[in-house]
Amino acid sequence: MFLRAGAISLGLLLASRLLGLLRETVQAAAFGASGLADVVVLMLTIPDWITGVLVSGALAYVLLPHWARQSHPAQMALQRRVARVLVVAGLGLGLLLAFFPGGLMVLLAPGLPASLAQVSRQAVWWSAAALAPALLAALWATRLQHLRDFLGLYAANLVFTGVVTLALAVAALAVLPAGGLQGLGPALLGAALLRLAWLAWRMHMAREGSTAGASEPAAQAGADAAPGVRVWLWASLAAGLPLVLPFAARSLASAGGAGQLATFNYAWKLVELPLLLAIQLVATLTLPVVARTLADGRDPAPALRRAFALAGGLACGAIAGLLAGAPAVAQLLFGWGRMTPQGVQQVASWGLAGAWGLLPQALLAVAMTVLAARGRMGPVVIAHGLALATLLAWGIGAGGDGTRLMWALNAASALVALVALASLGREALAWLPWPAMAASAAALAGTAALTRLMPVYMNNMPLALAIAGLAAIITIAFGWLAGSDFRAALQRQDDPKQHD
């Protein structure tokens, strides 16, 4: 059913995520778990994180449906207007960061030693310079999404990450890590500008390709009016608050001392990669069908059961894999160069704790599709705000303990997921694939018990990786065998209406 289109975009997405993971691996090899690594993590992530929180998701939520109702000239006029706002905002916010770099670092990395104050200021200056290009790139990426140019959209991430990874590799080969840091700032700015140039070229190619196309449909009445401030605000909160939670936890981990922020960042990557793949796979393969079913007014129960089954099964499989092989995966990804064995062990321990948040976040991705289609995002936004407040209150007393912070993130994810499912109403009970979920949960519980009984294999990395892969496959297979919804989600069908 869900394995029809999207293979190219999904492949590019996988390539982008894997290259991003390689970037983290090279970064760990270059700087280890040190105060300098904390600075590098912040410098490379601040521009895109600010962009993601403030505009990336909001642009998609607001502009894509708005452009669908507009004529092409009106679309371009709105795009130019938004571009001007983003460039001005990026330059203004960048100047603010550049003038107060010390305050920003105290807020985001309170555990940095005073000896890194000058390096921290330089890192913030480069981040500030890359902010405006990042904001504009988010708009142009949304335009390519509207044009369905997924090659241009995902390849832009490959361009950016590739340049940064190359610069980190040079730093990893340097005799002194501080010498490699000096070239990372220009590499960050250069990568941001190259990404922008790629997006501009793809938009130009898309315009040329559409000149011979059919005439545009008539614009709907009132579509030329720009979206209101209230629409932008709710869209920004809905898309940005989920990104704030792990970022805030990472900063709270810095209270544990130099290198703890970087360690938490690496540990979160163990969770983030399967999380993104599970959610993005579900989004690519299932959510368009779910959205079409809701738009057509048909019974959404079959499509949603399949979406929930696929999301939950993949999430449980990822958890099982990390339960069985987190130390081996951490060693494979981060046990190189200047990374110490103690740092790798801490990454594995924290990542293992964070793995339990995969299931609620995967279920939340499906529930959000229904809530967005029905215009009922308010409760989830409020839940994210409460979750953030709870995380901050809990994290301040955690003393930089990454394990406690990961469990706080898990609790926050569970809270938001429960609120989202409750917002769907009683009908959500019929949408959940109970047999598949029960089977996956049983397999997951068995994996957890077995890994406690057989810790000896952990010292053999190839064996541990093989066992981790086997645990993930078995857990997914349990869900696939127990319920027809999981199997139906992976069937090829020419007409989804016949099976929904």
Image (cartoon, rainbow, N blue to C red):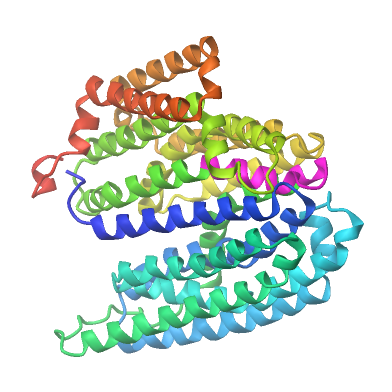
Q: Is residue 431 visible?
A: yes
Quadrant housing residue 175: bottom right
In the orientation shown, which residue stands out farthest toward the front?
A: 175
Which region of the structure is painted magenta? 253-271
Rendered view: 430 above or below 68: above
- Where's the N terminus, which quadrant? top left
Q: Position of residue 47 (x, y in %)?
A: 62, 68
Rendered view: 246 above or below 7: above
Left/right of residue 330 with respect to residue 70 in the rendered view = right
In the orientation shown, which residue stands out farthest toward the top?
A: 453
Q: Is residue 93 visible?
A: no
Residue nearest the observer in this picture, 343 or 139: 343
In the orientation shown, which residue stands out farthest toward the right?
A: 114
Q: Position of residue 447 (x, y in %)?
A: 44, 17
Q: Position of residue 377 (x, y in %)?
A: 48, 50
Quadrant housing residue 15: bottom left
**Is residue 215 on the magenta stretch?**
no
Residue nearest the observer in this picture, 144 or 235: 144
Residue nearest the observer in this picture, 324 or 292: 324
Name the residue: 64% across, 63% down. 44
Rendered view: 77 above or below 368: below
- Where's the C terminus, which quadrant? top left
Quadrant housing residue 97: bottom right
Q: How many marks?
A: 0
Name the residue: 30% across, 28% down. 430
Judged by its main secondary structure, the magenta piece is: helix
Left/right of residue 389 with respect to residue 442 in the rendered view = right
Name the residue: 38% across, 30% down. 469
**Is residue 254 on the magenta stretch?**
yes
Q: Position of residue 152 (x, y in %)?
A: 35, 72
Name the residue: 33% across, 89% down. 73
